[in-house]
Amino acid sequence: MHIPFVDLKAQYAFLAPEVQQAILNVLERGDFVLGEAVALFESEFAAYCGVEYAVGLDSGTSALELSLRAIGIGAGDEVVTVANTFIATATAISCTGARPVFVDIDPRTYNMDVSQIEEAITARTKAIIPVHLYGQPADMDPILEIAQKHNLAVIEDACQAHGAKYKGRRVGSLGQAAAFSFYPSKNLGAYGDGGMLVTKDQAIAERVRMLRNHGQREKYQHLVQGYNRRLDSIQAAILRVKLGHLDEWNASRRRCAQMYNELLGRDLVVTPIEADYAEAVYHLYVIRAQERDGLQAHLRSRGIETGIHYPIPIHKQPAYQDLAYDKLRLPVTEACGREILSLPMYPELGVEAIGGVVEAIKDFLNVSRSSKLAASPWPADARQPYGASAGGPSVTG
């Protein structure tokens, strides 16, 4: 059987009548830019996240960048974040003139290792951007405590975590502001690009509203030099339809993840760990395997699509070599780049498909187990199946 990595056609088939009517409504009104649908979606998404304000934007990248600009981040500043994320987390920082400062990640959750943050803070540090990677919330309480101690802002990168909860609270409601992406494959995805900044801070919201629309508060009154970063009305109308189904879809993703966990067990590959403070929404279901590339090729030969998120950490990307990150050691992040593999994950994924993926993995590992296994930097309590030392990775940087 062919098992896609994501299946957007299945979702559209379910939503087609609602989506088509929503688009038609915009066409009939003719308010294509910052129209009624945008205002309504901003209000509804703010309420969903548990915040007062939401500002529709053209991408999650813009949401990150403009949130930083709104709190005054600029040239010469530093922002602490992680390198195991999509490069937009870092480029949003760079576009303001600031410098990304990377810390390593927790080998259990793949999110920011909070124990490394204070060591990375300098006199230039102005903010921290934790990433709720793969739909699992970062451990926010210690991050917020460190930020308060050092008078730093916290901007959540929630671009993969729509609806996820940290200690019962939605992500997006925890820092000074948060960024969401509505890229089509996200848990809440548009039919094109889109993004949202959410915040409890009226001043941040008002600043971003101006920045997204050429610096205008009123038409032709340009108070600051701004940008064209607006969310389209048609995309907002589509997202309003989808928002009503998001919790149901997230529950389905959680059921799919649980099925993967039960069928894979702990002795085949390293399956995701959900932290006790988290309710993850599994934008991605990411396993770890030392023979990752061979496993991915084997799954491809069986008609199973997979992904790698992310094969090259940001500090190893050519785009950032001018910042001399070549000497930076992030051993857990770098091991992730070699070992992680994202399996098919979407709400409509069926029992038969999950069973097919698991059987293909078992078939490969039964063949490959005879090969010599290398040492791995993962601690034993991170579901390490390879027999490596429980001492954990050494961390410098």
Image: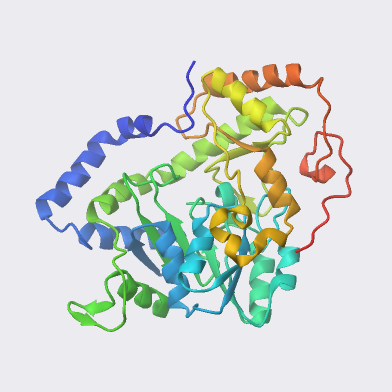
Give above or below for 318 relative to 254: below
Q: Is 143 situated left or right of 185 in this image?
A: right
Residue 223 position within the rendered picture, expressed as x and y whole percent measured from the top left: 28, 84
Residue 311 position within the rendered picture, expressed as x and y whole percent measured from the top left: 60, 43
| Front in this rendered view, residue 163 or 286 | 286
Whether residue 361 is visible, yes or no, is yes
Q: Give the image quarter of residue 166.
A: bottom right
Residue 211 position within the rendered picture, expressed as x and y whole percent measured from the top left: 33, 73
| Front in this rendered view, residue 260 or 131 | 131
Give above or below for 370 relative to 384: above
Residue at point 73% right, 29% down?
Answer: 265
Whether residue 200 is visible, yes or no, is no
Q: Give the image quarter of residue 224.
A: bottom left
Q: Give the image quarter of residue 116.
A: bottom right
Q: Is 66 situated left or right of 287 in this image?
A: left
Q: Residue furthest front?
A: 322
- Quarter the C terminus occupies: bottom right
- The colour mode here is rainbow
